[in-house]
Image (cartoon, rainbow, N blue to C red):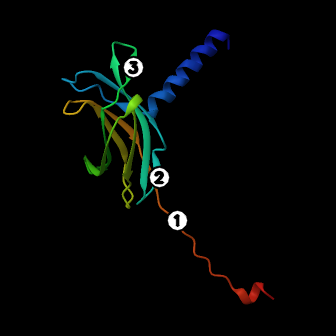
Amino acid sequence: MDLRGFVTFAALSALSITAHAQHAEPTASGAPAGYELALTGATHGERGHALTLTGVGYEVNGLADLRPRAGLEVDVEITARDGRTRRTYGRAQARTEAGGRFTVAIDLPAEALADSRLELVVHRSGQPGRRFHFPLHTRSDLALDLLTDRNRYQQ
């Protein structure tokens, strides 16, 4: 494979990895600006425990200008498929601070969910915004109780 072919292959591979990291809907019509989100934290956790996420909310100006903005609202929901519709299993909200930074904790449900995901909406207060989807994986909190035969191993 020549250098040009390798560079093309590497670029396409990187695009496919990025595309599966998050899915975002277009900014809602009537929104005063475009929005972007940088999310830090694992999108998996133990059922019945809190999941803490940190991130930065941006407003988009033009085609390539991202500005971190304080005062944006970040609405977080945990949803899962319930038959043909999606049902909400938890909600939380945060407001971006200086530099657009936010931290939000949301409780994971105790039961196993089908096709669960984390949905975040970034917007100005009272305005439409943009919805971001991330796959959510939960696992059970495991415990092991072990009973040994002390008479056998202490001889």
Instruction: Label 1, secondary structure: give it.
Output: loop
Q: Is residue 57 left or right of residue 12?
A: left
Q: Amino acid at mark 2?
A: Gly
Instruction: Label 2, secondary structure: give it.
Output: strand
Q: CA distance from mark 1 to mark 3?
A: 42 Å
Q: CA distance from mark 3 to mark 2?
A: 30 Å
Disc 3 packing (10 Å; few <14; some 14–19; many ≥20): some
The residue to which callout 2 is attached is 45
Q: CA distance from mark 1 to mark 2?
A: 12 Å
Q: Is residue 92 left or right of residue 39?
A: left
C-beta proximity under 8 Å, tags 1 and 3:
no
Write the residue at 39% across / 20% down: 66
Q: Given this view, does label 3 or label 2 mark the residue nearer the observer?
A: 3
Q: What count of labels does the image hold? A: 3
The residue to which callout 1 is attached is 142
The residue to which callout 3 is attached is 66
Instruction: Label 3, secondary structure: give it.
Output: strand
Q: Residue furthest front?
A: 98
Q: Is residue 16 left or right of residue 148?
A: left
